[in-house]
Image (cartoon, rainbow, N blue to C red):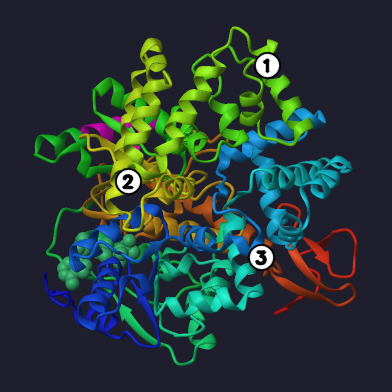
Amino acid sequence: MEDVLQGLNVAQYEAVTTTEGMVRVIAGAGSGKTRALSRRFAYLVNDIGILPGNILCVTFTNKSANEMRQRIHLLTGDNDTGYINTFHGFCVSVLQEDSYAVQYPKSFLVLDHADIDAMLKIIYEERGLTLRNMTFSKARDMIEMRKLTKEPLYYLDLIQMSLEELQEKYRTAVETNDIIFYGYLYQQKKCFGLDYDDLIIFTLYIFEQNEEIREKWQKRLEYIMIDEFQDIDKLQYRLMEVLCGYHKNLFIVGDPDQTIYTWRGADVKFLLDFDKHFPSVKTIMMMENYRSTPEILSVANSLIAKNKNRMQKDLLPTLPGGKPVFCHHGKTAEEEAVWMAKKIEELHEDGVPYRDITILYRAHYLTRTVEEVFLKEKIPYTIYSGIQFFGRMEIKDALSYLRMLAYKDDLSFARVANVPKRNLGERRMAFLREYAEQNQCSLYDALQKNLDHEMMKGTKAASFVSLIENLASNAAERPVSEVLSEILDLSGYEKMLRTEGSQERLDNLAELKQSVYEYETTCGEEATLEHYLTHVALFTNNDVESGKDQVRMMTVHSAKGLEFPYVFLCGMNEGIFPSRKTNTKQAMEEERRLAFVAVTRAKKGLFLSEAEGRNFDGSMRYPSRFLLDIDEKYLTHTEPLAKDRYAEARRYIDGKEKYLEEQEKGASFISGDRIQHPIFGKGTILEVDMERGAYLIRFDKMQTFRSISIRAKLEKIDF
Ligand SMILES: Nc1ncnc2c1ncn2[C@@H]1O[C@H](COP(=O)(O)OP(=O)(O)OP(=O)(O)O)[C@@H](O)[C@H]1O
């Protein structure tokens, strides 16, 4: 086993070996946070003798959790890698062990977007709503907002109300929002489904209500480490406080310059003010960058320095000098893409594999032009996201088949019973729904009980039931990958895709099988079918890696935490990056941090580009202020600068900044903040509507909400 302390710099060494008490690491991009974290884990296990099962290591994504597990497995040689997970994933583990405390079965379902949409579909049909009333995505947002701010005690409905009571609440709801909200809670309770927010809220509730369970977890987690702490939100912070309450060994690491999830409730203050809440904390700074060339770092430092609201710190280079950072101006978006294609071909001819090259952008729609050019130039590429891998039809179908084996739940049944066709169309489904409703049973039970019914004549219902029963009988003891292959084969699902000639879908299924296999070999904990299913709902697109030699394309958000030898950051125009939706100064600083995250992903080469043209709203496209932020001496322009265009851009940007300045006056709160109003008293900010210059506030003493101007005298309060 290698020496875990070897090859660490002074700050990293300190971070790894200071194991007791509260430790905060403020680290720069590429300064080896991940390295420090994994070595610290290994140090605790190898050198101190802590059992991995007593360590919790929280990462931001599943992908980083997987990578961390692999690293730790290599470093400790131990198959048990403890709790290495996202907050959500960790909560799944808690609930799998202790959900009985809220009368939920171990086999609760973790709901993802597609599941929620399937539930919404049922509600819309039952109550005659259409997408004109509200789109699914708006409905999902509304539900989330309502759970987090307007109705934070909603979980008591789920936990304490009977199914009938909830159904009644749904039946008697009149307003669209109420119908959707209570309909959703009812659907959730019906299948014991929990969405991402519920996972944390339920866990917190159990910890608050049940001292025994709380103490068990507190005592079990002797050491807690949290990565990407700059993006932690209020609920996660509360969970952290509870978890470290007994041993008080907490190690947090983050980079305030990489906070990019404020819009989802992240608050960098938790990192910056950590010493105020925990005065005994020891702070370690890690600023030496091991990832990028000094040229790239100069660009990054120069860019982020323009943020006013930040802790002053510069990334220090450790690598030798490399190539200059190029900046290209295209007459059109197409010309910009042609330039990228040309540069990529040059790199490729110099021996750089395509997979070492990544194209980053602010928004997905930018790929269209790039794709058209790449197709023409025959440059192989793959897009991360777009439709999320785990949201694709064939992947959802395959997972629903697996879920049928474990839970036989209605959502999965509705998805796969007639795919491939078994003659179980709408009419027969309606019959089953009615039977299930009357007899208070699941759709699958309804089918099983009615196999001989007149209605089921001429269908393949019986063979479907025997397939599920046969495979379900021993699925729990077999490797998930094996069960998956078998069910895709025996159900005729793969055959259906082959007949349709859907090669891409078949490839995706192959990818899924591979990812299940990888999960089995790295998960450390027991990789049972139920385990896999409860965790898979948390997976995202980035969790599936393609081994092919292709240029990768992804949004900057999904590049968080990753590094690539060559990065092309395209669409660097006002209205794109920063996005045209950026309406506050804080949001603008967040956009700049996002640009900083983008440029600090690059190891050897960085290529920036922008193009003339018009935005969706018809406005002129100017070069991004972020390009203008970077000191000229650090950029090599591929052609002489069009001075006039830059001057015009400067004028435009100055005007916009001034506008933000005006807007800013008074808008000092974010949604979720508690405030005191001189007349209405205490309340909670629900929304900040910058266009109207108003907050939507729920006052504690009022039945309905009020829109209050951002200029009104409000004071922030704690409770
Ligand atoms: N002491 C060191 N000596 C040599 N290389 C190192 C050292 N520490 C880290 N590195 C290398 O530097 C690169 C960046 O490290 P890592 O990914 O851990 O950074 P990070 O701080 O997590 O980055 P970010 O926050 O930007 O995602 C990696 O390639 C890593 O192997």
Q: Which residue is mark 3?
A: 670
Left or right: 245, with 528 as reference point: right
Per the image, label 3 sits on a secondary structure element best described as loop
- Residue closest to the far top: 458
Q: Which residue is mark 2?
A: 641
- Please give the range of residues in magenta: 328-343
Looking at the image, which residue is at 75% across and 46% down?
Answer: 181
In 3D space, how far apart are the residues under numbered discs 2 and 3 (Cα atoms)?
Answer: 40 Å
Label 1, residues with CA under 10 Å away: few <14, some 14-19, many ≥20: some
Nearest-to-viewer mark from 2 and 1: 1
- The alpha-carbon separation of the residues under discs 3 and 1 comes to 50 Å
Magenta: predominant secondary structure element?
helix
| Placement of the C terminus among the 4 image quadrants | bottom right
**What residue sits 42% from the left and 47% below the top?**
532
Looking at the image, the residue that sits furthest to the bottom is 280
Q: Amino acid at mark 1?
A: Arg
Q: Position of residue 20 (x, y in %)?
A: 35, 87
Side of 251 relative to 115 (left or right): left
For the residues labelled 2 and 1, the Cα–Cα distance comes to 68 Å
The quadrant where residue 197 appears: bottom right
Does the image show residue 529? yes
Q: Residue furthest left?
A: 350
View quadrant of ligand 1: bottom left
Amino acid type shown at disc 2: Leu
Report the amino acid beneath label 3. Ile
Asked whether the beta carbons under mark 2 and mark 3 sit within 8 Å of each other, the answer is no
Q: Is residue 5 above or below residue 566?
A: below
Q: Confirm whether the magenta stretch covers residue 333.
A: yes
Circle 2 or circle 3, nearest the eye? 3
Q: Earlier in the sequence, mark 3 or mark 1?
A: 1
